[in-house]
Image (cartoon, rainbow, N blue to C red):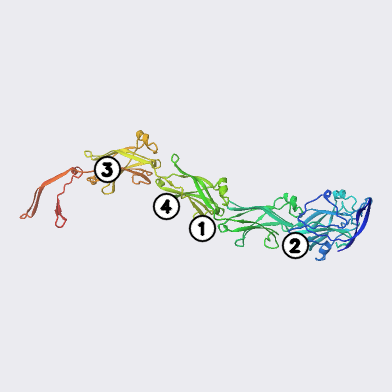
Amino acid sequence: MEEKKHFKLFKAGKKWCTMAIATLAVAAGTAVMAGAASADEAVPATASQPLQTAQVVNGQSATGTADQAASQSDQPANPATGNDKQNNQQPQRQVDYRTPVNAGNLDGANMDKNGNVIFGGWHATNQYQEGMHHFVIILDGGNNHELYRHEVTTVERPDIDKAYPKAPIAGQGGFTIAVPADRLNGANSLRLVSRYTSDAAGNPTGGVDYWFPVVTTKAGWLDQFKVDGNQITVSGWHVDDQAASKTEHTVILWDKTKGREVARTTVENVASADLPKVGYATVANGAQARFTANFTIMPDMMGDEFTIVSRYNKPGQQDSDTSDLWLGGLKINKTGNAGYLDNFSVDKANKKINVSGWHADDMSAAEPTHTLILFDLTTNKEVTRKDVATVASPDIARAYQNVYNAGKSRFNVQFDLTPAILNHQLEIISRYSQPGKGNDSGHYSDYWFNNNRLNLTTNKQGHLDQFYLDKGNKKVIISGWHADDASALMPTHFITLYDKTTGKELAHQIVKTVASPDIAKYQAGIANAGQSRFNTSFDITPEMVGHQLMVISRYSDSTSEDDYGHHSDYQFNNELLNFSVNQAAHLDNFTIDRAAGKVNISGWHADDASIYMPGHFIILFDKTTNHEIAHK
């Protein structure tokens, strides 16, 4: 501290008087980042205190003088050169040493290519004497420890000269100073002190100090930190004086739940013209501090909480001598899973199954591939599947705000209507999975729409107009009609003659359906009602005799008579044919001729079946042993 005399003007009656006041030149205070100010906005300090500030940064105040700070640090590595002494004052200038002036402003900062932070500003005072040195001293804004000092480069400031025309140093009080970023020791805030002194090393000898408000050297903010599809999207800004020498910017995704790094990426900063306007003009990279980054979400990240580490480091040295800033917080949920089918129906005309609805699932963040599966509940097997892109669903986002992909969860797809699934019950499964792992257990998340199933039961009707035996021609005559929705997919029409007595098929043949306008009139809802009549016949065979016969009309997707393929049947159960036969018999003689060792048999047997069974056998049967003895 140094005792100094100042003169204060005061009014006694109508006269102005001066009074000498001895003061200690103690400047103190910290302040949140000062913005740039022009000379026209400067306000001269009072005579009793060259500078007095008492503002607060982060809830703490700091006080001290530059000479006090200097006593707590080593002598700077770069001694004053004296090359920029203020020795060009114009003789004709009217200098007023009595009116107190001590004002200044830190206009801003930037970086050069040599790893320096360049600060610029001005300091005008009436306590300057010709030949004095002009130093700027850099203090740690948190504890006022000196970090660096150097004699400045003078910058002409006509605007300051206009504002303070009678100050001995004003227009030549502008300055710039290049501060090696490494000398700032990673301090989160700085305080600059402008000093006019007669001492070539920059120690206080005459002259005066001006303490600029505390400036932030490191700050940041995340404008965006969210889940977007299967990506974590990050955007924001990080201003840092250390960026002057640590020119590589690394963004790290840190898992707070597991306490480990998940991933990192190197980013290129882009322009941030807004930041210097809101208080970061004095941070080296304030005008080039914005960044964006993306990280892929993996399943083991679900349910965890994350933060971002924004790091400036020297190229290729991402894990040593870094300047880090921890930003933001994000938790990835994994509990939300909801869905609904708006439509699950058959388009008969186009032979399609239409499916539309939505499925919102937190796990989609880690499992971005969306697949719809058509599942056959009748056979308990998958029918087919399709990868389907989801589209915007703002209505779902309003209802399920906490589920990540609720705003993009709608889908619309068609499956082919195939013969294999006719008359079966179907269900839809919506699946989110990791790419290429749609069938790997533990790598997908499903939603079964079990409240909306589709029964593909086909409409079918039929009737036999004729079903009789033409014994004269040894034929079974069949005619009638069979209308069936399945015929649209199964165009081949089979007529099968079935033996209900033995439970076996007797014969089948492919028939051609013909026009049936009469059927179309009262079965209009069935696909082929207008083309459903048939007429055919089968040969009477001996195995039919005495049995009950039935007709089955079958539509199939096979064109081969030896393969029914997928088919849809109509059994004419109420229209059966009993193949009964008339028969009568009598034995005229049935005796034993013991002498000749013969059994004599004679008689007659009349039978309709003889038409189809011309061979006539006489069998001698032993009823005692229940065995045949002989036959002829």
From the viewer's perspective, tell me whether residue 406 is left or right of residue 559. right
Q: Which residue is mark 1?
A: 442
Mark 1 surroundings: few (<14), some (14-19) or many (≥20) residues within 10 A = few
Q: Quadrant of the N terminus?
A: bottom right
Classify residue 30 by image quadrant: bottom right
The disc, 2 or 3, on the residue closer to the chain's N-terminal end is 2
User: Mark 2 is on which residue type?
Assistant: Asn
Mark 3 surroundings: few (<14), some (14-19) or many (≥20) residues within 10 A = some
From the viewer's perspective, tell me whether residue 242 is left or right of residue 592. right
Vertical relation: 403 (above or below) 197: above
Q: CA distance from mark 2 to mark 3?
A: 103 Å
Estimate the x, y position of residue 4 in percent, counting from the top left: 89, 61
The disc, 4 or 2, on the residue closer to the chain's N-terminal end is 2
Q: Which residue is mark 3?
A: 576
The label shown at residue 185 is 2
Q: Residue at x 51, y 46 (%)?
A: 357
Q: CA distance from mark 2 to mark 1?
A: 48 Å
Q: Secondary structure at mark 1?
A: loop
User: Mark 1 is on which residue type?
Assistant: Gly
Classify residue 134 by image quadrant: bottom right
Q: CA distance from mark 4 to mark 2?
A: 69 Å
Estimate the x, y position of residue 379 in percent, counting from the top left: 40, 51
From the viewer's perspective, tell me whether residue 379 is left or right of residue 176. left
Estimate the x, y position of residue 136 in percent, counting from the top left: 82, 58
Nearer-the-camera pick, 604 or 357: 357
